[in-house]
Image: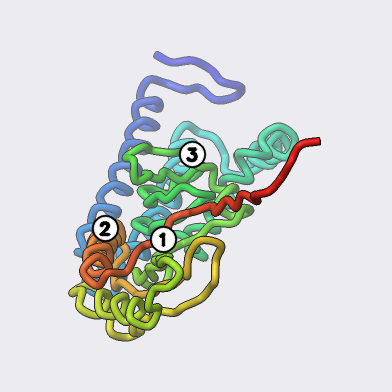
Amino acid sequence: VGFTLGSHRISIGHILFFIGILYGSFLTSWIVQKLLANEVIFKHKLEKGVRFSIGRLIHYAIVIAGFLLALSALGFEISKITIMLSALSVGIGFGLQSIANNFVSGLILLFERPVRVGDVIQIGSDWAEIKNIGIRATTVQTFDRADRIIPNADLISNEVTNWTLTNRQIRLIIPVGVAYGSDTEKARQILLDVATEHPLIMDDPAPSANFEQFADSALNLVLRAFLPDMENRLATLTELHGEIQRRFADAGIEIAFPQLDLHVRSGWKSE
């Protein structure tokens, strides 16, 4: 029982064999990726992102090889399949440019690895963590727990800030304005003490506090300090802000706010 496709007679057995080969290729790819993810292969020698990239490339290679083998099992010659793929490439050039562009960009992401699974990136004003790099698009999760699907070409052609490409350190910048007449040296020392005494602030590079500007309503100081891991960024900022406010209040240093002085001239007479 079967049907004829061109000059080939395809039976139910051929179809089952075709499905079996495809299923076997996907199953083999899944097993290999699991072995890489669980560190059974290359244990303690490659980081997570490298294992993921190798796993994806192996997945594509096994699936493509399985598909070609399955077509051969149906009786199609590899040379004819090559001609068909060549014709398909012409169609891609005209109608599927976006898909082809994203596919090639995905390969660039896997080879060059400007972003990796687990990296924290910033696109515009949004921060997100890379969850998956696919063949067409990359899945990221924002800090609001919203999943975003970004075409791979956008990650290659647009500017992306990767906060964890080489390390997970991050610098905190805390501007503080104090009222005119305040002791800026005392305020600067308080900022340094707050940063130095915090358990998560790094000693190298050491924190710094500078008096940087005479503003309209304030004397502006800036505290700069490094964290070893950006995961603690928001919590550390909250703790530092609270401690700065408390110590300034104890020292009698007023944190400035915008003010406008209005001078009224006396002696004006109407005509």
As drawn, is 111 to the left or to the right of 240? right
Q: Which is more N-terminal, label 3 or label 2?
A: 3
The N terminus, quarter of image: top left
Res 36 seen here: no
Position in image of residue 194 (x %, y %): 25, 74
Mark 2 against mark 3, which lies toward the viewer?
2
Q: Which is more N-terminal, label 3 or label 1?
A: 3
Tell me the quarter of the picture where residue 187 sits: bottom left
* Up-down relation of residue 27 to residue 116 (above or below): above
Residue at the image position 54 percent from the left and 52 percent from the top: 260
Along the line of sight, the residue nearer the viewer: 253 or 137 = 253
As drawn, is 252 to the left or to the right of 82? left
Residue at the image position 43 percent from the left and 65 percent from the top: 177
Tell me the quarter of the picture where residue 234 sits: bottom left
Position in image of residue 57 (x %, y %): 43, 56
Q: Which is more N-terminal, label 1 or label 2?
A: 2
Q: What residue is shown with label 3? A: 72
The span from disc 2 to disc 1 (Cα, nearest Å) is 19 Å
Determine crowd level at label 3: few under 14, some 14-19, many 20+ residues with C-alpha closer than 10 A.
Answer: some
